[in-house]
Image (cartoon, helix red, strand yellow):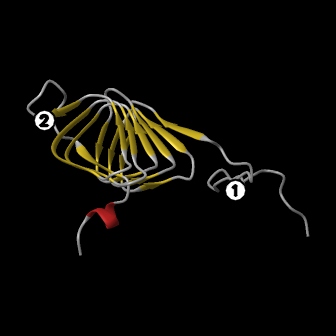
Amino acid sequence: MFKSSKADPMSKPAAAPRSSGSSTFSVLGSDTLITGDIEASADLHIDGRVTGDITCAALVQGVDSEITGAIKADSVRGTVAAREIVILVLGKIEGDVAYDTLTVEQGARIEGRLAPNGGGMPPAIGVAVEDVKDAVPA
């Protein structure tokens, strides 16, 4: 019949509904560590560490970031260091690329320097691909 005006201190607040207006950019700061896959319709800027696959519109990889996993994006910016890099026909990397093996399909673009991992760039930390499932032969 009557409701208390005091809120239960142990109850969790209701989650705010997501806005229908979409954000065009999300940032993971340098103090962030994520273990698990990330899926975003927006562009991502990652300065922290991610262990898992990333799917997004475009990725900006910060200088000190580490990504261990597959990246599926239309474009990648920043230094990319990986054991295996496959860039499919619509893929684009803007930045320096260090690799052990590199596959670039006709039509893909790289705007930056290429160096085997023995070169002057960081050691392998992940895999950058435009579409992982199409990169591996059946």
Which is nearer the N-term, disc 2 or disc 1? 1
The quadrant the N terminus occupies is bottom right
Question: Mark 1 packing: few (<14 Cα in 10 Å), some, or many (20+)?
Answer: few
Q: Amino acid at mark 1?
A: Ala
Q: In which quadrant of the rendered view does residue 75 lie?
A: top left
Determine whether, in the image, residue 67 is placed left or right of residue 122: right
Question: Residue 114 location in percent, x, y?
Answer: 22, 32
Q: Is residue 138 above or below residue 56?
A: below
Question: Residue 26 location in percent, x, y?
Answer: 55, 40
Please state which of residues 132 and 126 is positioned toward the viewer in this rendering.
132
Residue projecting furthest to the left: 118
Q: Amino acid at mark 2?
A: Asn
- Residue where numbered disc 1 is placed: 14
- Residue where numbered disc 2 is placed: 117
Question: Mark 2 packing: few (<14 Cα in 10 Å), some, or many (20+)?
Answer: some
Q: Which mark is residue 93?
A: none
Q: Is residue 89 above or below residue 120?
A: below
Please state which of residues 50 and 135 is positioned toward the viewer in this rendering.
135
Q: Secondary structure at mark 2?
A: loop
Residue name at image x 29 percent, y 30 percent: 96
Residue name at image x 53 percent, y 43 percent: 43
Q: Secondary structure at mark 1?
A: loop
Residue name at image x 70 percent, y 54 percent: 18
Determine whether, in the image, residue 21 is placed left or right of residue 65: right
Determine whether, in the image, residue 17 is placed left or right of residue 91: right
